[in-house]
Amino acid sequence: MLENDRTQPKLPPAGAIQSLSGIDSGGWFEYLVRVYPHHTDYSGAVWHGTYVSWMEEARVESLRSIGIEYADWVSQGWELPVVELSLRYHRAPKMGQSVAVRTRMASEGVRLLWDYEMRSTDGEELYATAQVTLVAVDGEKGKIIRQLPPMLKDAFAKLSIKP
């Protein structure tokens, strides 16, 4: 064993951190990520743009958790572009830490509103909160879909928060 091997932290392999299946009673889906060097700025803190990528990954994985493949929607000519994004930074996680990215669909309709929380995996540290608004668009026509196709409507109904 090399001398340096004894001082290196022992982390589980990257594949050990995965999305958790299912959505909790509050409608939250949790997606776990680890902070790698390419996620950080010069100080080792998560770079501000990284959060947006994590949010999209969590949103796509939440759809996958209910059996919906985002790529299938795109192949059928539907798109869900982000039209508004609000992101508040509370504290930056550091390289090597794990982050729980929680997302839920807050409302459905022509505008689809998604809420986000990024926390330490023990839930003690709040790193960021966000809200994203998407709209369904017909990819060929480039127009907003005002009446959602049944496939989209059914999927969104499974994810939306019920009062």
Image: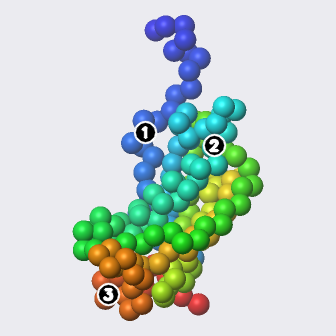
What's the distance in space between the residues labelled 2 and 3, CA to CA? 38 Å
Mark 2 vs mark 1: give the one in front.
Answer: 2
Q: Is residue 8 above or below residue 112?
A: above
Q: Which residue is mark 2?
A: 46
Q: Are marks 1 and 3 in contact (CB under 8 Å)?
A: no
Q: Nearer the viewer, mark 2 or mark 3?
A: 3
Q: Which residue is mark 1?
A: 14
Report the amino acid beneath label 3.
Pro
Label 2 to label 1: alpha-carbon separation: 18 Å
Q: Which mark identifies residue 149?
A: 3
> Which picture quadrant has residue 47?
top right
Position of 160 with respect to 65 (left or right) is: right
Around disc 1, counting alpha carbons within 10 Å, would you say few (fewer than 14), some (14 to 19), or many (20 or more)? few
Name the image quarter holding residue 46: top right
Amino acid type shown at disc 2: Val
The quarter of the displayed image where residue 9 is located: top right
Circle 2 SS class: loop
Rendered location of residue 41, percent (x, y): 64, 36
Count the marks.
3
106 or 38: nearer the eye?
Answer: 38
- Percent across and percent down for residue 138 are 34, 79
